[in-house]
Structures are given as C-alpha cells and as structure tokens.
Image (tube, rainbow, N blue to C red):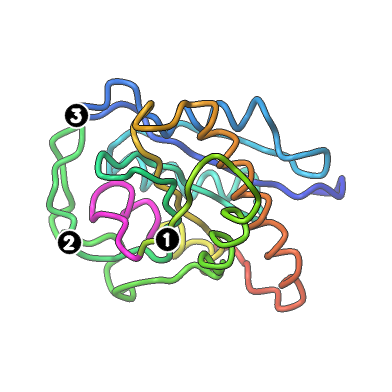
C-alpha cells in the first residue's frame, strides 16, 4: 500500500455443525464496525468450513491485499474466554468438513514442519489486554483443535512466515455478546499491531510467493 496505512485482513468462519450462526463471523463483523483507527486499512472475509476453500482463499487474500497482518477468528464450543492461539499444527486433520471432505494425508502442507509458531508474542498480548480493563477474559493456548481452525492457522503461518494470528471465541452469549467479542478483537489486534510495529526492524513478516 502506498498510502502509509497498514493493511490488516481478518477472517471469520461460516456456519457448521451446531453453529448455525458462527460467533466468529459475528465478532469479525462487529470489529469491522469499530475499525482499527485511521492508520489501518481493515478487510474482513467470511471463510467456508471447507479444507479446499481454505486452500484457495488464503493465498488469494495474501496476494490481493499484501497485508502486514492476517488474523483468523474461529468459534470453540469448549471456550469460555477469548483465546489466543500460539501455533498451528500440520497433521491430524481427520474430521470431515461441510463438504464431507478431509485431506487424504490428514496433513495441511506436505513436507512442512509439524508446528509453526506465530511471531507474535501471544502471552504479552494476553497480559496487556487483560490489564486494560476490558470486560472480556483473554487466555492463550497451544492447541487450536486439529480442524478447520488449526488447518487455516497453519496454512496462514506457512504462507506468511509466521506473521499470522488465530483467535478462538466462545459461542454467542456463552458468556459474551457479539459486541463484546468485537471490542475484545479490536483490543487484541491493536496490541498485535503495536508489537509488530516495534519489531519492524527485524523485517520478519514476509509473504511466501
């Protein structure tokens, strides 16, 4: 981008299983209404709960927007907090998607590392957001679940050289509203951007062509 703004892409997932309304997409839409301030160009995208759709969509998002940061948001029925995932995993994808498909190899990127960590220090982001007085609890995790969330995260980390993030949210009203989740995402993303800005000199966020 030549306008001096930083570009951020945020995705949420569409419906699947018991989640006829996916809290992640609701939260991302709330974030879009709030924005990330005048210096950030925010693009949001709903992602189908389909492995092959993810394989097509993620590279196109990186190519189209050349973002400084991509953040994926997913729902977890087990979550009661906003959860910052620290890493994505390459193997173990046995669950069928909305098209009743899963990879034959049960693998995201053949020949890829077993696990890729985000360059973002999630524990620091978590600590700072929790100290900010937000009415939403934030925690960290090292297991994004070996389904489309984890698959999407690993592929994005692979494409970006680690410059991606994944945030799990609980189902709506369990206990937070969509509006609360949107405010929490905004606080989390602003902390991530501040951290990346401080680390800019290392130039470690590069898209893999």
Q: CA distance from mark 2 to mark 3?
A: 19 Å
Please, what secondary structure does the residue beneath circle 2 have? Answer: loop
From the top left corner, tell me how far across and down residue 197 is, in percent: 75, 64
From the top left corner, tell me how far across and down residue 7 is, in percent: 70, 47
Q: Earlier in the sequence, mark 2 or mark 1?
A: 2
Q: Report the residue marked by disc 2.
A: 92
The crowd level at tag 3 (other Cα within 10 Å; few <14, some 14-19, many 20+) is few
From the top left corner, tell me how far across and down residue 199 is, in percent: 71, 72
- Residue 168 position (above or below residue 48): below
Disc on res. 140? 1
Along the horizontal axis of the image, is 9 left or right of 98? right
Determine the residue positioned at 70% across, 74% down: 203
Determine the residue positioned at 25% across, 44% down: 78
Determine the residue positioned at 28% across, 38% down: 50
- Residue 45 position (above or below residue 20): below
Q: Report the residue marked by disc 3.
A: 17
In this view, the residue farthest toward the top is 20
- Residue 85: image quadrant is bottom left
Bounds of the magenta span?
142-154
């Amino acid at each position: 981008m030549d306008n001096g703004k930083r570009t951020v892409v945020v995705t949420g997932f569409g419906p699947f299983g018991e989640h006829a309304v996916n809290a992640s997409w609701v939260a991302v839409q709330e974030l879009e209404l709030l924005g990330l301030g005048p210096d950030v160009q925010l693009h949001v995208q709903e992602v189908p709960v389909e492995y092959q759709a993810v394989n097509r969509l993620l590279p196109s998002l990186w190519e189209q927007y050349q973002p400084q940061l991509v953040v994926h948001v997913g729902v977890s029925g087990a979550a009661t907090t906003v959860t910052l995932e620290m890493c994505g995993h390459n193997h173990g994808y046995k669950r069928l998607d909305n098209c009743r498909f899963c990879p034959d190899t049960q693998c995201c990127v053949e020949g890829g590392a077993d696990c890729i960590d985000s360059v973002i220090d999630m524990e620091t982001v978590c600590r700072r957001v929790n100290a900010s007085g937000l009415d939403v609890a934030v925690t960290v995790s090292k297991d994004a679940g070996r389904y489309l969330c984890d698959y999407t995260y690993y592929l994005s980390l692979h494409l970006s050289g680690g410059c991606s993030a994944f945030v799990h949210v609980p189902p709506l009203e369990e206990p937070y509203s969509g509006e609360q989740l949107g405010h929490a995402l905004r606080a989390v993303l602003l902390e991530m951007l501040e951290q990346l800005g401080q680390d800019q000199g290392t130039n470690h966020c590069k898209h893999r062509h």
